[in-house]
Image (tube, helix red, strand yellow):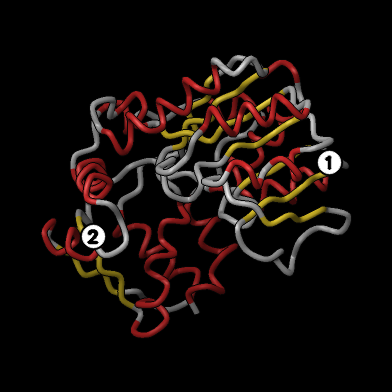
């Protein structure tokens, strides 16, 4: 049995599907109700990573765990309590979704410090572990869905500054392999996309998938800050804007790790756009 936390999220949902397709028994854990597209034979349990006592039941009878960041970049988690419960009920392996910010922004509390503390807890847990450090996600552009649906417009900062974003389904496939195969134990994989792509180019790709042009409106940093501060902690906003506006060399590096694990290159953003275009119509 494999437990997937964050099972209704952008990584968790395709991970549950990939594991089910492989024939694995899966317990899908999320705070909300079971998704309508939950694979046949998959058990769903409502539980909250920020309340470790709710996890004992879904963890029972499992031998592997996918540890998500709780949907808040790890804020509010007690990873040692979560991992102690996992170990206590007999889980042997943990695959953790982390952030490349652990190494690219080590001085940032939001992107480096919090996730580094969770990584440390994973390494010290006594479980067999694999850590997946993700770059920016293609699914972050879901934030543009409403404005694209209503007036075919994207408003974002740093229109011509790019980073190599990754399809969450690629992270899910790497996680599915690491959860099932021993040879990935003790590895830290950095996962990002096949090319550097700018917000303006992402908007163009979405327009191509729609069959209609999408207009790009560039926000100033202060305008973007004001919007993001309505749903992100201040420290997260500042570091996110730093990454988007002035990515460093490590954040621009194209990692070989997706291809190393899966035997193929990461999917391009245009493929993610075509697969998810219904959300933007």
Asked which secondary structure carries label 1, the reply is loop
Instruction: Give the left or right position of residue 15, taking residue 106 as reference.
Output: right
Instruction: Give the left or right position of residue 254, taking residue 233 as reference.
Output: right
Q: Where 85 falls versus 228 (above or below)? A: above
Q: Quadrant of the N terminus?
A: top right
Image quarter for residue 36? bottom right
Report the residue marked by disc 1.
Answer: 22
Instruction: Give the left or right position of residue 119, taking residue 229 as reference.
Output: right
Q: CA distance from mark 1 to mark 2?
A: 41 Å
Residue drawn at the location 63% of the way across and 55% of the way down: 30
Report the residue marked by disc 2.
Answer: 229
Residue drawn at the location 80% of the way across and 37% of the way down: 60
Tell me which numbered mark, 1 or 2, is placed earlier along the sequence.
1
Residue 215 at x, y percent in the picture:
28, 74
Can residue 161 be seen? no
Q: Name, please, the residue furthest toward the front.
A: 53
Q: Where 205 falls versus 150 (above or below)? A: above
């Amino acid at each position: 049995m494999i437990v997937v936390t964050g099972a209704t999220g952008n990584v968790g949902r395709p991970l549950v599907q990939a594991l089910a397709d492989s024939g694995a028994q899966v317990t899908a854990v999320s705070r909300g109700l079971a998704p309508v597209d939950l694979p046949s034979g998959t058990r769903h349990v409502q539980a909250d990573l920020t309340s470790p006592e709710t996890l004992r039941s879904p963890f029972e009878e499992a031998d592997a765990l996918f540890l998500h960041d709780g949907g808040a970049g790890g804020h509010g988690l007690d990873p040692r309590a979560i991992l102690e419960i996992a170990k206590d009920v007999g889980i042997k392996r943990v695959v953790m979704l982390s952030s490349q910010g652990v190494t690219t922004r080590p001085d940032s509390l939001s992107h480096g410090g919090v996730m580094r503390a969770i990584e440390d807890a994973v390494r010290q847990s006594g479980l067999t572990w694999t850590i997946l450090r993700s770059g920016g996600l293609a699914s972050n552009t879901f934030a543009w869905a409403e404005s694209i649906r209503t007036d075919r417009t994207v408003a974002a900062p740093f229109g011509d500054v790019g980073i190599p974003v990754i399809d969450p389904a690629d992270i899910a496939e790497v996680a599915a392999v690491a959860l099932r195969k021993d040879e990935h134990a003790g590895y830290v994989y950095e996962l990002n996309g096949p090319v550097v792509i700018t917000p303006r180019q992402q908007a163009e790709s979405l327009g191509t998938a729609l069959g209609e042009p999408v207009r790009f409106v560039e926000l100033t940093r202060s305008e973007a800050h004001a919007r993001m501060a309505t749903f992100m902690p201040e420290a997260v906003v500042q570091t996110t804007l730093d990454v988007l506006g002035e990515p460093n060399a490590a954040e621009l590096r194209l990692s070989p790790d997706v291809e190393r694990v899966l035997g193929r290159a990461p999917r391009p953003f245009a493929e993610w756009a075509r697969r998810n275009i219904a959300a933007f119509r």
